[in-house]
Image (cartoon, rainbow, N blue to C red):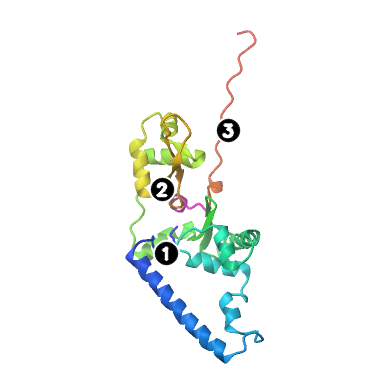
Amino acid sequence: MWRRFTPPHTPLSRIFGWVLIILDLKNQAKLYHSMTDFNFSTNPDNPVSQASGADLSLSARLEALLFAAPGAVSPAQLAAALEISPKEVEAGLASLEARYSVPSGESGLRLQRHHGRVQLTTAPQTAVLIERFLGLEATAHLSHAALEALAIIAYREPATRPQVDAIRGVNSDGVLKSLLHKGLIQEMGRAEAPGRPILYTVTEDFLQHFGLNSLSELPPLDEEPEPPQSSPNN
């Protein structure tokens, strides 16, 4: 899946930000002139009402905000922008999520949730199509060692390097550095343990790479087999 916008701190994102500022100034100018020409307090079609999106459903307004956002945002941010409660935002997001997950495949978008934040992404089924459309090279394959480390962190997050090493049986320092460089994992503080090892979690890019909307969509782990019970005669 691909994000709708380029990563922050790039020339393109700066230009896009400037464009938004110019458009906002232009809209404010239009609104000022409209206010001088109309009695907007009694006109049901006044530009103030249209500008606030009051004629749109909650899910439509949330969709617009998520589309315009440069990355993942929290429900609290959406609630503040819409001047509604976080509970209402969650209801709207659930409605939006249900619309995107219809099996008929009517939408090419998905709502991605990770660490309490949400964002719009493209459906994983469109990855090849988007790569071809944008002229992008196919995503580099991950090594078996990288997949092992990713699986451990995804299922156990937050996880430390000693924990990953203990499960894999080998040193994972180089693998973790590579995954950090690729943006598939991130540092999330330090553990309250001897040496205070770094805690790692997976990122939104990890979800996009594997076509997941949230970690809850990871396949369930098989239950560990119970140890054999010793015979009373032994």
- Of the numbered discs 1 and 2, the one sitting upstream in the chain is 1
CB-based contact (under 8 Å), mark 1 and mark 2: no
173 sits to left or right of 117: left
Check disc 2 and give the amino acid type: Leu
Q: Read off the residue under disc 1.
A: 5
Q: CA distance from mark 3 to mark 2?
A: 27 Å
| Identity of the residue drawn at 48% across and 53% down | 211
**Mark 2 crowd level (few <14, some 14–19, many ≥20, 10 Å Cα):** some
- Can residue 80 be seen in the rendering of this structure? yes
Which sits in the foreground, 23 or 134? Answer: 23
Residue 114 painted magenta: no
Q: CA distance from mark 3 to mark 1?
A: 40 Å
Q: Is residue 209 above or below residue 221?
A: below
The quarter in which the N terminus is drawn is: bottom left
Point out the stretch of residues depicted in magenta: 207-213
Check disc 3 and give the amino acid type: Glu
Q: Read off the residue under disc 3.
A: 223
View extreme (bottom): residue: 37
Q: Specify the quadrant of the image occupied by residue 105.
A: bottom right
Which sits in the foreground, 123 or 166? Answer: 166
Q: Read off the residue under disc 2.
A: 184
Check disc 1 and give the amino acid type: Phe
| Identity of the residue drawn at 47% across and 51% down | 207
Report helix, strand or loop for mark 3: loop
View extreme (top): residue: 233
